[in-house]
Image: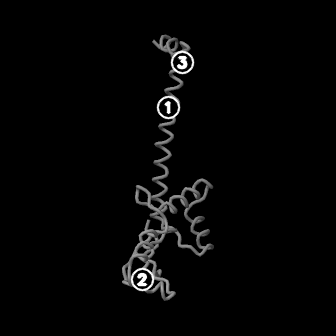
């Protein structure tokens, strides 16, 4: 989305068009505003009019976390590892790691997602088993036996 907005700006900004006609790229990646684990917020600037554009390097999920960080934590957890292992791998890749607070926050959200999913799946399975028991008459026999 931000790339589209930046390109549209460069195509309509008269000063930027002048730069392009002279062989100069109209947009410059100025700096990194901030880093959040594997995600960053970058700042691009139109060299014609100096309008700035912020760009996230990863989409944000509804819960506010960056998608790439959630995927990194999830991948770390399913391989039986933790924060230390993830940050060691990221250090070898010369990438910023996640803070303990961020890792634990994302880990708790993943745990809650799985608990919700598993509870819904368990409720569905219980309903199916009950329906089968009622259809075969086993449910009624067991209820009579318990009384």
| Quadrant assignment, res 55 | bottom left
Residue at horizontal 46%, vertical 80%? 27
Crowding around mark 3 (Cα neighbors within 10 Å: few <14, some 14 to 19, many 20+) is some
x then y, percent, for residue 116: 46, 42
Say whether marks 1 and 2 touch (CB < 8 Å). no
129, 42: nearer the viewer: 42
Where does residue 59 sit, x and y in percent of width and height? Answer: 46, 62
Question: Which comes before the other along the chain, label 1 or label 3?
Answer: 1
Give the residue drawn at x 50%, y 67%.
Answer: 98
Q: Earlier in the sequence, mark 1 or mark 2?
A: 2
Q: Quick one: label 2 or label 3, which is nearer the N terminus?
A: 2
| Residue that badge 3 annotates | 133
Alpha-carbon span between mark 1 and mark 2? 59 Å
Residue 46 drawn at (x, y percent):
41, 81
Is the residue under label 3 in contact with that under label 2 (CB below 8 Å)? no
Disc 2 marks which residue?
A: 16
Q: Is residue 136 above or below residue 112?
A: above
Classify 143 as above or below 69.
above
Quickly name the residue at label 1: 124
């Amino acid at each position: 989305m931000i790339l589209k907005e930046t390109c549209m700006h460069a195509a309509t900004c008269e000063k930027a068009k002048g730069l392009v006609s002279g062989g100069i790229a109209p947009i410059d990646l100025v700096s990194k505003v901030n880093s959040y684990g594997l995600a960053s917020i970058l700042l691009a600037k139109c060299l014609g009019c100096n309008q700035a554009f912020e760009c996230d390097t990863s989409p944000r999920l509804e819960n506010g976390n960056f998608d790439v960080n959630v995927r990194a934590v999830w991948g770390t957890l399913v391989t039986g590892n933790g924060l230390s292992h993830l940050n060691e791998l990221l250090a070898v890749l010369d990438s910023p790691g996640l803070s303990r607070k961020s890792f634990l926050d994302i880990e708790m959200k993943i745990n809650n997602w799985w608990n919700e999913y598993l509870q819904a799946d368990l409720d569905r399975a219980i309903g199916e088993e009950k329906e089968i028991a009622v259809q075969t008459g086993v449910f009624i026999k067991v209820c009579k036996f318990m009384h």
